[in-house]
Image (cartoon, coloured by chain):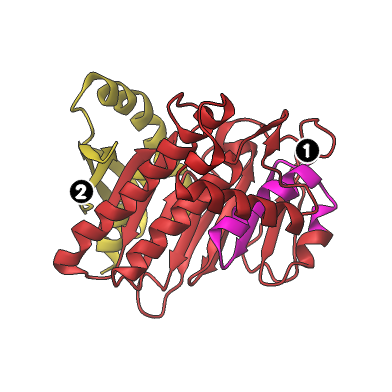
């Protein structure tokens, strides 16, 4: 399933889009592919390259909880979690 | 509709489940504007913010943005409610940073409600305000990040129209100072507070973190708010009304 694209903004302007595709076996996520990630400028590109492998690993670890949001989470995870959850919501409906 | 905004040194994510049609884009723009405005007025990292100019004596309280008086009144109220464990005074200067994020996120959420949204969730760097429910008959499921294991959840709490705020070392390393002793608070690894208003949930979590273990009895006495406390050795305590899952 492919999640809806999540826009990522800074200072009120949108500087990129994050979108993931999940492969599910039953209800278990077996793999995640990033179809789009913020790379409009060198900085967002650098952040994406640094953060995405970590986020992908964390998602595969924390999956199954089927959550809408996280309290106390590291801030880099916000867009990623949103996109993964959007894909999961679509798988359920 | 989902949007993530980088602002106030963190990321604020919006998840709007009400179909607002053409009303949505301007409502979201206004909500995002509120966050940037809060940053411009209150950021202690921006030399041109009102709060920094006030600290340097370049402007008088009367010259400050109207929000300044509102936030300081709120800080005074919260300081009273928490017996001084939440404080906007730090090393002899005024620093309302502890209240600004929760205040701004709650205002952004209220703006979406005013625009007609009856179901949304706004998460500002781990402090969450929910409105309504994501789907008919289902509550928002909010994971609570485990303070001792990166990527793991300590609990999942189901809420409808409540806020969830966590104070602790998971996000940025230990940085809460006990305002009554001036020393870093280290009895707890994290405190999560669940209740109607994000401003209060956030301030109570910060106060409880500074207070340490006795915070459990204090939070149990606060009407409408429930809490989960986790110690550095992994042991956890919750108030009687805390409904989150527990291992």
Q: Which residue is mark 2?
A: A5
| B47 shown above or below B136 | above
**Which numbered dot is residue B178?**
1
The colour one sees for chain B in the rendered image is red
In the rendered image, residue B177, in percent from the top left (x then y), is placed at: 73, 34
* A50 w.r.t. B179: above or below: above
Residue B107 at x, y percent in the picture: 43, 58
Q: Which residues are magenta?
A: B188-216
- Chain that the image shows in yellow: A
Q: Is residue B210 magenta?
A: yes
Q: Which mark is residue A67?
A: none
Q: Residue at x 21, y 27 (%)?
A: A39
The residue lying toward the viewer, choosing from B54 and A21, is: B54
Give the residue at x 75% y 70%. Answer: B240
Q: Chain of mark 2?
A: A
Identity of the residue furthest to the bottom in this view: B137
Tag 1: Cα neighbours inside 10 Å, few (<14), some, or many (≥20)? many
Q: Relative to B30, is B9 on the left or the right?
A: right
Q: x and y percent of residue B70 in the render?
A: 54, 53
Residue B208 highlighted magenta (yes or no): yes
* Distance (Cα) linking label 2 and label 1: 42 Å
């Amino acid at each position: 399933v492919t999640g809806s694209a999540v826009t990522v903004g800074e200072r009120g302007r949108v500087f990129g889009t994050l979108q993931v595709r999940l492969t599910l076996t039953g209800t278990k996520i077996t793999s995640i592919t990033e179809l789009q990630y913020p790379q409009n400028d060198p900085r967002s590109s650098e952040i994406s390259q640094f953060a995405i492998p970590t986020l992908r690993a964390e998602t595969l670890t924390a999956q199954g909880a089927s959550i809408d949001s996280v309290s106390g989470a590291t801030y880099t995870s916000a867009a990623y979690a949103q996109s993964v959850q959007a894909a999961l919501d679509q798988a359920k409906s | 509709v989902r949007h993530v905004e980088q602002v106030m040194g963190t990321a604020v994510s919006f998840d709007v489940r009400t179909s607002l049609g053409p009303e949505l884009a301007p409502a979201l723009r206004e909500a995002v504007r509120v966050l940037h405005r809060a940053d411009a007025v209150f950021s202690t990292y921006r030399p041109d913010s009102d709060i920094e100019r006030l600290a340097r004596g370049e402007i008088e309280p009367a010259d400050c943005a109207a929000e300044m008086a509102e936030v300081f009144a709120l800080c005074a109220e919260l300081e009273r409610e928490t017996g001084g464990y939440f404080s906007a005074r730090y090393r002899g200067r005024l620093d309302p940073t502890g209240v600004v994020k929760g205040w701004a996120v709650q205002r952004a959420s209220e703006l979406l409600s005013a625009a007609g949204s009856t179901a949304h969730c706004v998460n500002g760097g781990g402090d969450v305000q929910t409105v309504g429910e994501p789907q008919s008959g289902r509550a928002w499921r909010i994971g609570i990040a485990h303070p001792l294991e990166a990527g793991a959840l300590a609990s999942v709490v189901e809420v409808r129209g409540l806020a969830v705020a966590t104070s602790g070392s998971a996000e940025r390393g230990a940085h809460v100072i006990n305002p009554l002793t001036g020393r870093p608070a280290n009895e707890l690894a994290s405190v999560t507070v669940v209740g109607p208003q994000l401003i209060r949930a956030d301030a109570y979590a910060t106060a409880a973190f500074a207070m340490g273990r006795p915070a459990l009895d204090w939070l149990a006495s606060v009407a409408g708010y429930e809490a989960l406390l986790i110690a550095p050795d992994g042991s956890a305590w919750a108030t009687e009304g805390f409904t989150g899952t527990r291992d």
